[in-house]
Amino acid sequence: MSFEKEIKEHFTKGHEKFLRSVSVDCIIFGFHEAELKVLLLQAKYAGLWALPGGFILKDEHMDDAAKRILQERTGVNDIYMQQFHVFSQPDRSTKKVNKQFLKNVGVDLEESWMFDRFITVGYTALVDFTKVQPVPDSFSAACNWFNINSIPEMILDHANILEKALANLQMQLNYHPVGYNLLPEKFTMPELQKLYETILDKTLDRRNFQRKIVSTGILKRLDETKKGVAHKAPYYYKFDLRKYQKALKSGMGFEL
Amino acid sequence: MSFEKEIKEHFTKGHEKFLRSVSVDCIIFGFHEAELKVLLLQAKYAGLWALPGGFILKDEHMDDAAKRILQERTGVNDIYMQQFHVFSQPDRSTKKVNKQFLKNVGVDLEESWMFDRFITVGYTALVDFTKVQPVPDSFSAACNWFNINSIPEMILDHANILEKALANLQMQLNYHPVGYNLLPEKFTMPELQKLYETILDKTLDRRNFQRKIVSTGILKRLDETKKGVAHKAPYYYKFDLRKYQKALKSGMGFEL
DNA sequence: TATCATTGTGTCGTGATAACGCAATGATAA
DNA sequence: TTATCATTGCGTTATCACGACACAATGATA
């Protein structure tokens, strides 16, 4: 199917597949070279950047829609995602954006479910940077990681959504463990600490951090140390998946 | 307008006024005679109970929709409300429920936006029990308070929503002050403590509770004591509204 | 073999918290 | 009038978690 036809079909018949007036936007965080990154899409023609988003199939749980969107953009499966907020300002009208998009594609339409006002549900995901193969969607020209500290200009209220997502992630850090999807299977304590420091955007005391993390029991220390470092070699750790999952639900019981 | 006509109009033309596929459900908590209560509506014909809910006007912020619904059911204005979760199981189909309702009303329709699948956003509100005049909506036969421990059978997933709302309220209690909308203007420390104990469903140490609450600075002690009690008379307190509002945003900084 | 950055483990003072004591109050009952 | 009693206001103490810091151990590099 040609691109124009695909777009036209989406605009004229999408409402037969998807719920109307509701979208899902994913804030996909990754961690690479001591930097917190976010996956963004560049809108065709407009050039501005956007959060990976999509719609909810008529017979699909919203959580599954979010996972499907994540899978389509990154190729990654089975990730812990959670909704964190619904954005519903009446002026977040996709109408202008979508009409301009259609004009650029060369499709002319008077009516479309895509011109309706949408509310959107924000989902956060934490993924292994190295496993992601960024894939743009039909509306986008590019799909790239951005450092959280150098975000480009974004469409609509997406900058606001991203800001709220980051604040939510920082808050959640005190109650839910983080790292299982963000780090390799084996990792050292300094690596885990760097992850926490990057997300929280502040330095933590090495010794106190170790004590608290270890006390939660979500880690298993291996009898193996890192090789090839010009100083004392740190131990490798793995997550104790059972206790990790438990802590995801019941909380960690401390603050950092 | 006759009831049948009103219903028919809502089912045939409601989608011109409201966003499709999205509803708002309010969990309205009140406090009376040392009991935590929830305001519920009894669905006509079916007899089961439901959370007060409604739809979002095409040009309305979702928060305002929730406040409008609260206002219509209770007559109460200017209440602190917040969304806490979106419920989106594909099987929460209002279709059956709404078709049966229409049949009972005596209206016959094949198609309606009300037969679509809906996702719903849960909002919690805390209101002054004594100021509420419960008013049923068009779909309901009654509007009543229920003790949180004796909830009747509810439609769809509303029991689940209520459960989540209560858990959310209990969690929030550690970060946001509670009481301004739930208690009379003047109240005693034992009354405030009873409120906290009722919501958390556990007893708290009288002396430690007082110390922590006072240390937040959200209270102002009056030079007035309660009269007519057969023991030492407790002081009356008021909320320091400025500090209360501040604590709503920045948190309380302790756990109970 | 000395150096050096970094790690693993421990200590110590502070502040918050839970558990509990006790005198003061004021209506009620003797 | 006076003793009783539940309840309140204010205070004390032991415990524990936390932040800040010390020091020896490690292992590649110079």
Image (tube, coloured by chain):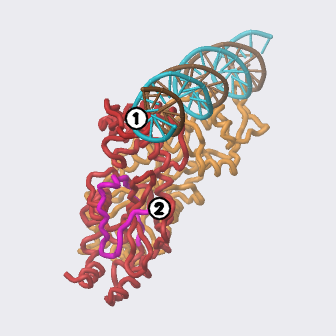
Chain colours: A orange, B red, C cyan, D brown
Report if residue A101 is visible in the image.
no
Q: Is residue A153 left or right of residue B35?
A: left
Chain bearing tag 1 is B
Label for residue B162? 2
Quarter location, residue A113: bottom left
The chain to which mark 2 is attached is B
Q: Looking at the image, which is closer to me, A218 or A41?
A: A218
Q: Is residue A247 left or right of residue A82?
A: right
Q: Nearest the camera: B79 or A28?
A: B79
Q: Give the foreground label among 1 and 2.
A: 1
What's the residue at 52%, 65% (across, down)? A64
Q: Which sits in the foreground, B193 or A76?
A: B193
Give the residue number, with chain letter if any, for mark 1. Answer: B233
Q: Quadrant of residue A143?
A: bottom left
Q: Position of residue B19 (x, y in %)?
A: 31, 69
Q: Which residue range is magenta in the image?
A: B118-146
